[in-house]
Image: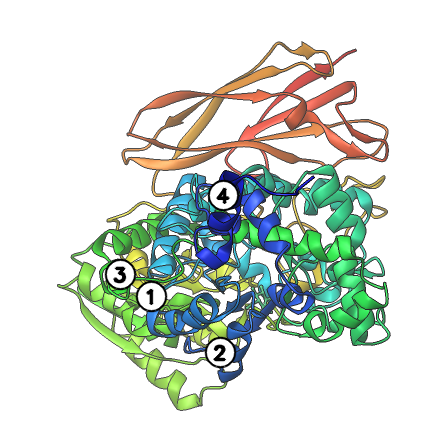
Amino acid sequence: MKNYMSSAALIFLLAASPAFGAEVPLYKDAKAAPAARAADLLGRMTVEEKFGQLQQLDGLWEGNYREEHLALAREGRLGSTLNVRTAPFANTLQKEAVERSRLGIPVLFAFDVIHGYRTIFPVPLGESAQWEPQLAEAAASAAAEEAYSVGLKWTFAPMVDIARDPRWGRIVEGSGEDAYLGSKLAAARVRGFQGADYGAPWKVMACAKHWVGYGAAEAGRDYNSTDISESALRNVYFPPFKAAVDAGVVTFMTAFNDLNGVPSTANKRNISGVLRGEWGFKGFVVSDYTSVKELILHGLAADGEDAAVKALSAGVDMEMVSTLYRETGPAALAAGKISQADLDASVLRVLELKFRAGIFENPYIDPALEAKTLKTPEKLALALNAALNSMVLLKNEGALLPLSPGIKKVAVIGALADSRADMLGSWSADGKPADAVTLLEGIRAVAPGASLVYSSGAFAGAADKDLDRAVAEAAKADVIIAAVGETFDLSGEAASRVSLALPGRQLELLERLKKTDKPVVAVVFNGRPLELGWLNDNLPAILEAWQPGTQGGLAVAQTLFGLANPGGKLPITFPRSVGQVPIYYGHRNTGRPPDAKEKYTSKYIDSSFEPLYPFGYGLSYSSFSFSGLEVSPAVIAPGGKAQVSFEIKNISRRAGSEVAQLYIRDEAGSETRPVRELKGFQRVTLAPGEARRLIFELGPEELGWYYAGGYAVEPGRFKIYAGNSSAGGLEGVLEVKP
Ligand code: GLC
């Protein structure tokens, strides 16, 4: 029988063949599902192209690509870069990938946009002092717009590491010590960066980092080993990451630290077991900077190939900066050390996110966007508001603050009062110090009638003459504003300190300023809790300003002179001494709780066991009362819910905001739990005399705990605390009965 194909079928086949240019590969069909496009594209890729998609390389700090990036992009072997940014650089490199490589897979451009890109917001620890997730979300959204306008589509933020050791420099970058506050802020920042669709214009992919336990570095020394119990992982370090997953974060970054003997960058239990297995995370995981290669130094990997095999097999999809996947991967695959399934799964996750991020359809950035997006009046106003709300009033004896704008002579002492870079803090992306408002400038703007004398005084190792001059100037003034604390480079990555003291001769300067008998207001600029005991004992007023960002100096000045009323609360305990560290409110009670009157209790013989300022603490120019705590019903079943309400009233003559905080304590169970756990907060602004009844709900999500046997709400009595910090407050009881 003569074999022939009908003419119609023949025409269809010919017409469908690429040679006729009619067929568009599925992966190029913008209407097709991202997963289908990724699968189609994967099927067309060589092994080298696959490993190339898992490679992220570092650009030059000013934003340019490196020469070798062009060739790799042309060969389709460069999945992503960090630090390459702005249209001229990004578009040029992108053109090599999109228009000159075989498959045209775009490069994914990433950058550390942590607390702003060009408009810089308070450092995250300071932003956390706002206790206002919606402000954090708005700041992240503004940062995403600016990042997008320079060609970025991925930020390595939010950093959600819980930290309880202020010696650790990166404590500045997170949300402090508490899992609940950290979880709320992690979710808010993810929403801000990604929005409802991270593939839309003005939005970027977020990255929850550093997975996991990085903040528990032994001795507070960055990159140091960590030993963390399963209970602490589940109840302290995991929750903010889970909150980020629940908020839709699409990437994770693994951490540098060794975790219980298995470095986080090769920790299969946490990456494939918990993150993907238990939590159903569908995005992709990038290593930290050369953390794949560092598996050799850790003593986990024998050589480069072994490191690549262990990281990829653990679930790390993309290798940041070190090049072991690309260089050793093909041979390891051929030798069966890396499975084809693992390789393809990682490539699929990266490709699918690139499709969803929209960079196949929109690989280039319009060069005109940058100028009209950066540092707009709206973003600067948002940054000012963010800084104002991050201020924490630590002391205000005799209501010295706010100062009268009519005050005559003001001495502004301390180098930090005239430093732009130190207002921006660490991880300030493309923030420009020249944009920043200093405290000196802020005071000039807010109190134009005051005659100001300024002296840099002493910072680190200043000479006697510096102190003498500063003190002499100060003695002539009506009030002294002393700007003390840390420069931006004394916290952040690789900036751990053994001391929490004010650096240099600042304390000596303050002691001499006090001797002038003029009132001294201390403004503290810092990236970590510092030892402020002498200030607290000897000065009438202390304002914690953190590193408040581009508008920081103006925000501090507006607060000092009463144009704004501080309402921030500490997201981190301030110790009296570094010798108390780690010290945090959510500690366990022990069998011998500290009691200054009893010898054989858990305390120190040379210091108080109490912190200087507790978690959640902060004053205001207003005063508030708490009353009428109600728990209803007072008895619930283990899966039940109770409503807790109480009244907060502004009992002063000035409008202001207060952060109402709700804590619980499970008094007895199959495992011991902290003496307090934050389970609710609301920052409320009240007019003079205004009262409001606040309502919180306590259910399984709030009352439960991860025990050895899993998450549960155990029967028993729960103490309820409601107040304005983690100390004191109204007390109530909730019974959980089966
Ligand atoms: C750094 C940091 C990480 C950052 C990355 C890229 O070492 O640990 O937080 O995102 O490298 O800059």
Residue named by callout 2: 70
Residue ID at (69%, 11%): 636
Residue 592 falls left or right of residue 275: right
Identify the secondary structure beneath mark 1: strand
Up-down: is 120 above or below 326? above
Report x, y in % for residue 135. Answer: 39, 44
- First along the sequence among labels 3 and 4: 4
Is residue 39 something one can see in this rendering?
yes
Report x, y in % for residue 37. Answer: 54, 47
Residue 403 falls left or right of residue 26: left
Q: Mark 2 near mark 1, Cβ–Cβ under 8 Å? A: no
Report the colour scheme. Answer: rainbow
Q: Mark 2 near mark 4, Cβ–Cβ under 8 Å? A: no
Image-quadrant location for residue 433: bottom left
- First along the sequence among labels 1 and 4: 4
- First along the sequence among labels 2 and 4: 4
Residue named by callout 1: 481
- First along the sequence among labels 2 and 3: 2
Alpha carbon distance from label 3 to label 4: 45 Å
Residue named by callout 4: 12
Amino acid residing under circle 1: Ile
Residue 680 falls left or right of residue 592: left
Residue named by callout 3: 369
Amino acid residing under circle 3: Leu
Is residue 608 something one can see in this rendering?
no
Alpha carbon distance from label 1 to label 4: 83 Å
Report x, y in % for residue 698. Answer: 61, 21
Report x, y in % for residue 559. Answer: 30, 52
Alpha carbon distance from label 3 to label 1: 41 Å
Identify the secondary structure beneath mark 3: helix
Q: Mark 3 near mark 4, Cβ–Cβ under 8 Å? A: no
Amino acid residing under circle 4: Phe
